[in-house]
Image (tube, rainbow, N blue to C red):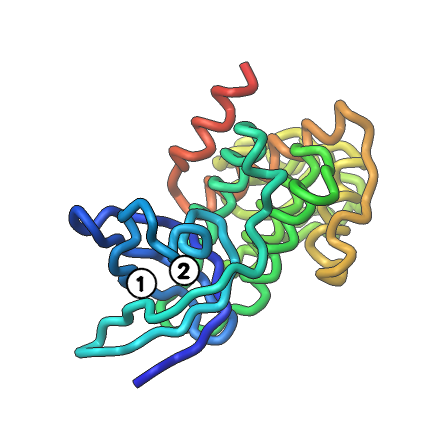
């Protein structure tokens, strides 16, 4: 049986001397693992569409529950991204997050669109990395089922609280959290408004918020910590990205 999909490559793993396994994210079939025969050969026509972070159209052949690439064509390779190691490493982090929160055979068009739009923002739009990173992290958390409560302090109802509970995903005032457990980070009105915007805006307007440089970095630090706390894991790709910033 043949299947035609549009997918973005999240991971490439060597299978043997000639072949590789691709983990891809599709719109209608969720995450798939597919075999690319001959990909490791120098003159393989699959090299461009099957490279990490490539978005393309794939014709797959299914045999005994395993998909094999029969034909592939590139749609977008994000060339500008590939010429900048820092941006490329950040894009790879996005791909790793998408792989973790996506599921086999479960459609997730919103996640695929988020990943593609974030890579486009880094590549073609050349938006600040901290801005794209923060928006991707918080929106990914929302898509994974961890939408935070950002309306008011969960205890007293104050609409301008000064702390964010990473574990509970909720806001609180300093006086309301005394003596309770959990991990909290400070949050100011500007960062809070940005988080509210990211979690509730239309997908096409995801990067339509503005913050000063200091607040943008604070937002990026907070969204990174929140996503890691909710997923209960770290990311090697993020560690590498941050090592390039030193």
Quadrant position of residue 22: bottom left
Instruction: Please name the residue shown 48% across and 64% down the image.
Output: 73
Quadrant position of residue 135: top right
**Residue 170 placed where, x, y %?**
62, 47
Up-down: is 244 above or below 60? Answer: above
Residue on which disc 1 sits: 33
For the C terminus, which image quadrant? top right
For the N terminus, which image quadrant? bottom left
Tell me if 88 is positioned left or right of 158 in this view.
left
**Residue 33 placed where, x, y %?**
31, 63
Q: Which mark is residue 202?
A: none
Label total for image: 2
Quadrant position of residue 175: top right
> From this viewpoint, which residue is outermost toward the top?
246
- Between 99 and 166, the one lying in front of the other is 99
**Residue 229 placed where, x, y %?**
46, 41
- Between 65 and 40, the one lying in front of the other is 40
Is residue 122 something that shows in the picture?
Answer: yes
Residue on which disc 2 sits: 24
Label 1 residue SS: strand
Up-down: is 96 above or below 221? Answer: below
Tell me if 237 is positioned left or right of 208 in this view.
left
Circles 1 and 2: CB distance less than 8 Å? yes
């Amino acid at each position: 049986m043949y299947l035609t999909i549009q997918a973005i490559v999240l991971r490439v793993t060597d299978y043997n001397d000639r072949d590789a396994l691709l983990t891809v994210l599709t719109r209608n079939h969720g995450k798939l693992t597919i075999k690319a025969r001959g990909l490791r050969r120098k003159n393989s026509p699959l090299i461009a569409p099957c490279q990490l972070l490539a978005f393309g159209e794939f014709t797959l052949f299914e045999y005994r529950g395993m998909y094999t690439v029969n034909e592939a064509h590139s749609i977008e390779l994000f060339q500008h991204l590939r010429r900048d190691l820092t941006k490329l490493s950040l894009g790879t982090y996005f791909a790793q997050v998408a792989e973790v929160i996506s599921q086999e055979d479960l459609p997730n068009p919103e996640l695929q669109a988020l990943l593609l739009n974030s890579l486009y923002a880094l590549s073609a739009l050349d938006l600040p990395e901290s801005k794209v990173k923060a928006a991707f992290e918080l929106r990914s958390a929302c898509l994974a089922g961890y939408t935070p409560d950002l309306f008011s302090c969960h205890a007293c109802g104050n609409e301008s609280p000064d702390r964010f509970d990473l574990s509970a995903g909720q806001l609180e005032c300093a006086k309301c959290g005394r003596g309770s457990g959990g991990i909290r980070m400070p949050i100011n009105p500007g960062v809070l408004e940005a988080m509210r915007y990211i979690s509730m805006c239309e997908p096409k307007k995801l990067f339509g918020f503005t913050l000063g440089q200091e607040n943008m970095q604070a937002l990026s630090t907070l969204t990174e910590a929140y996503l890691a706390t909710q997923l209960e894991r770290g990311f090697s790709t993020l560690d590498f990205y941050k090592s390039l910033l030193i």
